[in-house]
């Protein structure tokens, strides 16, 4: 069986290990709409307490939204980074979907970065990959500061 992007093989004879990201939330249905639109993912299944989102072409990590009773407290210990060629148009698009800008955009050692939160306050970063057209990220940074 050929390896797919996002999979690891410890031993060729063993089953493939796939990465899935699980995000605790208060309202899995509402957050599924945000993250599906934000990532360009589609809803692939739902079975309480989960809603699963995946890329339409099937390659890449699955995002599981797990509804939990307890509220989010404090900063996430792990977060999602969304890497893009330039912060715009994605920064404006994510804000229009309901994300909140928490910090930035700022230059993080050559990586233009904006720290955002989804509608439930889960932090994530939008990062312009170095080597992208510099004017696009610099213009975005100037516009949002």
Image (cartoon, grey):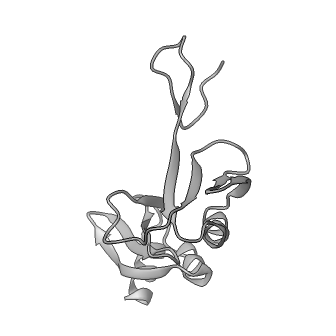
Residue 8 image position (x, y, % from top left): 49, 28
Residue 139 image position (x, y, % from top left): 44, 82
What residue sits 44% from the left and 89% below the top? 143
Q: Quadrant of the C terminus?
A: bottom left
Residue 84 in sight here: no
Is the residue 63 above or below the residue 141 in the image? above
Relative to 40, 65 lies left or right: left
Residue 128 image position (x, y, % from top left): 44, 64
Q: Nearer the viewer, residue 98 or 50?
A: 50
Residue at the outermost front position: 69
Q: Nearer the viewer, residue 94 or 71?
A: 71
Residue at the outermost top position: 13
Is the residue 132 above or below the residue 56 in the image? below
Residue 127 image position (x, y, % from top left): 42, 64
Q: Classify residue 58 by image quadrant.
A: top right
What residue sits 60% from the left and 44% below the top? 60
Q: Classify residue 107 by image quadrant.
A: bottom left
Q: Nearer the viewer, residue 67 or 45?
A: 67
What residue sits 61% from the left and 31% below the top? 4
What residue sits 59% from the left and 25% below the top? 3
Q: Nearer the viewer, residue 2 or 144?
A: 2
Is the residue 7 above or below the residue 100 in the image? above
Q: Quadrant of the N terminus?
A: top right
Total number of numbered discs in the rendering: 0
Residue 128 in sight here: yes
């Amino acid at each position: 069986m050929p390896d797919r992007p996002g999979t690891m093989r410890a031993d060729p004879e063993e089953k493939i290990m796939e990465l899935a990201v699980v995000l605790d939330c208060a309202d899995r249905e509402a957050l599924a709409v945000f993250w599906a639109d934000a990532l360009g993912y589609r809803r692939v299944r739902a079975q309480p307490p989960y809603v699963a989102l995946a890329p339409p072409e099937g390659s890449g990590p699955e995002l599981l939204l797990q509804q939990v009773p307890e509220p989010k407290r404090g900063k996430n210990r792990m977060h999602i980074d969304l890497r893009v060629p330039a912060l715009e148009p994605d920064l404006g698009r994510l804000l229009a979907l309901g994300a909140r800008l928490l910090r930035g955009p700022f230059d993080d050692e050559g990586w233009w970065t904006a720290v955002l939160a989804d509608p439930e306050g889960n932090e994530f970063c939008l990062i312009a990959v170095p080597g992208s057209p510099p004017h696009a990220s610099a213009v975005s940074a100037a516009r949002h500061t």
